[in-house]
Amino acid sequence: MNASDLSNPFFVLSTGSFGIYSLVMDSKGSEGEGVNVEEEDIPLSHEDLVELTQKTLTALTQAIPLLSDLPPAVTFEEVAAQVELEQGQSITVYVMRGDGEIMKVVVPSRGATVRDLKAAIARHMALRLSRQSKGKQRPVKISWRYIWRSHWLSADGINLRDDSALLSEYGVSNRSKVSFVPRLNERGRRLLSSRAEMA
């Protein structure tokens, strides 16, 4: 057995320092029969181990119905959020972008504030941009300070103005829709219509 043989999705990595334990499906076995447990010392580089771990996580998330809709390069935070969502500890908020795209953001169900929602949106976008920029030299960065200075989050026509207010105070609950709306001054004009006005 060599490192390339470990691409089989039916294995479990152990944290033991003397080898990698793997469960390999026997070609004769079906429905859990014929599973052999092997232990071998296989020298793996860090890159190989990272790739192997990512393949394992991808295979596991695709095999478990609860996690099957997660993206292939899943992170621990995404798995934890999905489990908390299933257990009722978190809620899903749909964030409508100006270009019509809808982002599905997960926040805690109890005690979540507007600030928590903003942080969840920023994490969601950072993860998405890092996945899109793989192989590119410079990933795209978003100035969230600019976004929050020039836009409100709005739920059912009510601007979420107080960052420390609970989402429930604004009527935001599971499956609520929130959108970005431009901040306006007293004359009804945008506060910051371009980056040039910010300087």
Image (cartoon, rainbow, N blue to C red):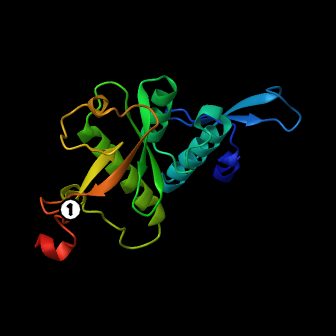
Question: Looking at the picture, which amino acid does disc 1 mark?
Answer: Tyr
Residue 43 visible in the current orientation = no
Q: Nearer the viewer, residue 185 or 101?
A: 185
Name the element at disc 1: helix
Task: Say which residue label 1 marks.
Answer: 146
Q: Nearer the viewer, residue 181 or 24?
A: 181
| Spot occupied by residue 16 in the image (x, y as percentages of width and height) | 50, 32
Residue 99 visible in the current orientation = yes
Q: Quadrant of residue 8?
A: top right
Which residue is at 41% across, 29% downward?
90
Judge from the rendering whether residue 135 lies leftward or rightward of residue 161; answer left or right: right
Is 162 drawn above or below residue 87 in the view shown? below
**Label 1 Cα crowd, 10 Å radius (few <14 / some 14-19 / many 20+):** few
Which residue is at 36% across, 51% downward?
179
| Spot occupied by residue 182 in the image (x, y as percentages of width and height) | 26, 59
| Spot occupied by residue 135 in the image (x, y as percentages of width and height) | 47, 70
Which residue is at 26% across, 34% downward?
113
Q: Nearer the viewer, residue 195 or 74?
A: 195
Is 183 drawn above or below residue 68 in the view shown? below
Residue furthest to the bottom: 196
Judge from the rendering whether residue 54 lies leftward or rightward of residue 104; answer left or right: right
Which residue is at 60% across, 45% downward?
58
Is 152 drawn above or below residue 83 in the view shown? below
| Spot occupied by residue 170 in the image (x, y as percentages of width and height) | 29, 34
Pick the quarter of the image with the C terminus: bottom left
Q: Quadrant of residue 126?
A: bottom left
Is 143 drawn above or below residue 109 in the view shown? below
